[in-house]
Image (tube, helix red, strand yellow):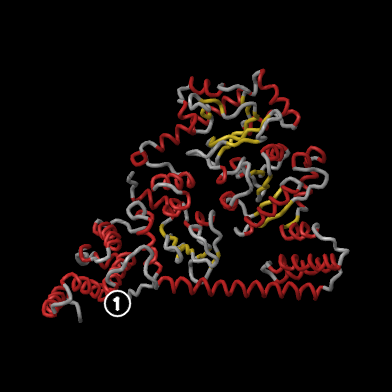
Amino acid sequence: MPQFSEQFLQELSERNDIVDVVSGYVQLTKRSGSNLFGLCPFHSEKTPSFSVSPDKQIYHCFGCGKGGSVIGFIMEIENLSFPDAVGFLARRAGMAMPEENDHGESKRRERMLHLNRDAARFFHEQLKTPAGQTARDYIARRGLTARTVTNFGLGFAPNTWSSLTDAMKQKGYSERELFEAGLVRQGKSGRGVYDTFRNRLMFPVIDVRGNVIGFSGRILDDGEPKYMNSPETLVFSKSHNLFALNLAKKSKSGYLILAEGNIDVASLHQAGFDSAVASLGTSLTDAQARLMSRYVSEVVIAYDNDGAGQKAAQRAITILEKLDVRVRVLRMEGAKDPDEYIAKFGPDAFRNLLEKSENHVEYRLDSLKANFDLTSDEQKVAFLKEAADIVAQLPGAVEREVYAMRLSEQTGVPRAAVLDEVSRRRKQRARREHKEVQRTESRPVRVAEEPLKGVRIQDTEAAAAERNLIQFLCHDPALFRTREPPDAALFVTPEFRHIYEVLSERAKRGESLDPAVLTGELSSVEFGMLTTMLNAPTELSNSEKALEDCIYILRKKQHGSGNDTDLSALQKQMIEKKGYGG
């Protein structure tokens, strides 16, 4: 297994905050204290017992016993080895892998970026050839200018099997490198390769550092799929990147416009709306939302004006509002998408639309209203119940009052009745959340007192002493610097012995006990045990004496409990040697 430096692993952990990483997979809710809780992704449960500690940068499930650092979480959730999980997080944070530790992975990454850049140049040059006429015609039909083509680096993938392959081979790239970059695919017979992108208008995907990390290709005939993206590679993850963010991050508008397609984005930029971005062929992901929140505090959703677009907008609202991002939604009457709207009505009309765009509450209520016939009393009541639930979630009393008044005007129901329903729904929600908090807060305490998952305790007194020693070592390593650490051979429980060996050896060498640096040295089961101990209450007020108590218990176990004379002599020896007992 590659050995990564302590400094590298600590930096990796710092640049991949465990709450941010875990939130991409688990919906976390703030609870009392500093920990956050959610439903465990590793086993089925109805009551959240999965805990994430921002302070300790660890996760632990009190139900199934799994736990670890941010690296360990990625190992478990993505089913990756330790070095692969390190590489995954390094790519997420834009960190280069140390060459001496990854057997050349950083060189492979750099080489892949060079290959992607050369491929982008190849596609761009092909746009100017006679074969690129179909792509130029399509660009003209969509109204894109030569400047926009250059700004976005648009290109053309010829309708051949090996044009890109042959060109890149001439530059010294191998078929294996092309395959790893997702630019070629293997033939059905397993022999040879062929170009992934053929007869497509090519959009290079460029990250915020200016690297070409992948491609998105739009078919130029009636073939399928209509859009094709690069597969996941060493440098590209479509769920963690946004098309045109490299350009939009420079905008002075103060917000990002989230569109559905690459053409929409290019058209918006061309019309002067330089903050437009798009997700890459998928619905908005949590990771993409967090990426946007790093640059702006407001997002305007400009999805297509059809059923699928409205559904995607609702999902995007749900994701974005968790991040304390202000969300507005465009309604484009008379056009199906921003590109068509600008073509029909012009940039000024779109700018006016932006200024009058609805906040997400208005959008959700209007979208909900479209599903009901408000001339029917029965449907009116059903609408108000669902609408009241939306309004009840608003944090401010003034906001709730305003939207309750609007619902009253729309339905003819007295404002007081609407407010009563909102209040009732809010109280119901508060009661549910309170009960959930009580269950969540009490569950970890109860479970933490149970035997550790995966451990067969042979001697409960010895195991308790061993756990205390490990806790002391983690919470106050200085205790072990003023004395010779107890020998691991004293430990009765094998799993605890190995955890202690790893920790004490690092402490002797003056090395960090940060969870990130321990991930490669402890098994997932052992790390689960360690995080259970780290989450359990630890009394450090009289730790010197408590430490000696633990040592005495383990030495007593080692010498056997049948000889009181020997035990008395041992205790006397310890008192004289350590000043213990006073």
User: Disc 1 marks which residue?
Assistant: 542
Please state which amino acid type lies under the numbered disc 1.
Asn
Work out whether 293 lies above or below 398: above
Answer with left or right where residue 494 lies relative to residue 76: left
Q: As drawn, is 108 to the left or to the right of 117?
A: left
| Outermost residue toward the right in this view | 375
Q: Position of residue 489 (x, y in %)?
A: 20, 63
**Badge 1: few (under 14), some or many (20 or more) residues near its Cα, within 10 Å?**
few
Q: Which residue is drawn at 83% across and 44% down?
A: 334
Residue 49: x and y in percent read 49, 66
SS assignment at label 1 = loop
Asked if 205 appears above or below 171 in the picture, the reply is: below
Q: Which of 7 and 116 is in front in this view?
A: 116
Of 372 and 572, the residue lying toward us: 372
Left or right, 520 with reference to 278: left
Q: Which residue is drawn at 44% across and 61% down?
A: 59
- What residue occupies the far bottom of the structure in this picture? 582
The image quarter in which residue 502 lies: bottom left
Q: Where is residue 475 in the image (x, y as percent from the top left)?
A: 34, 67
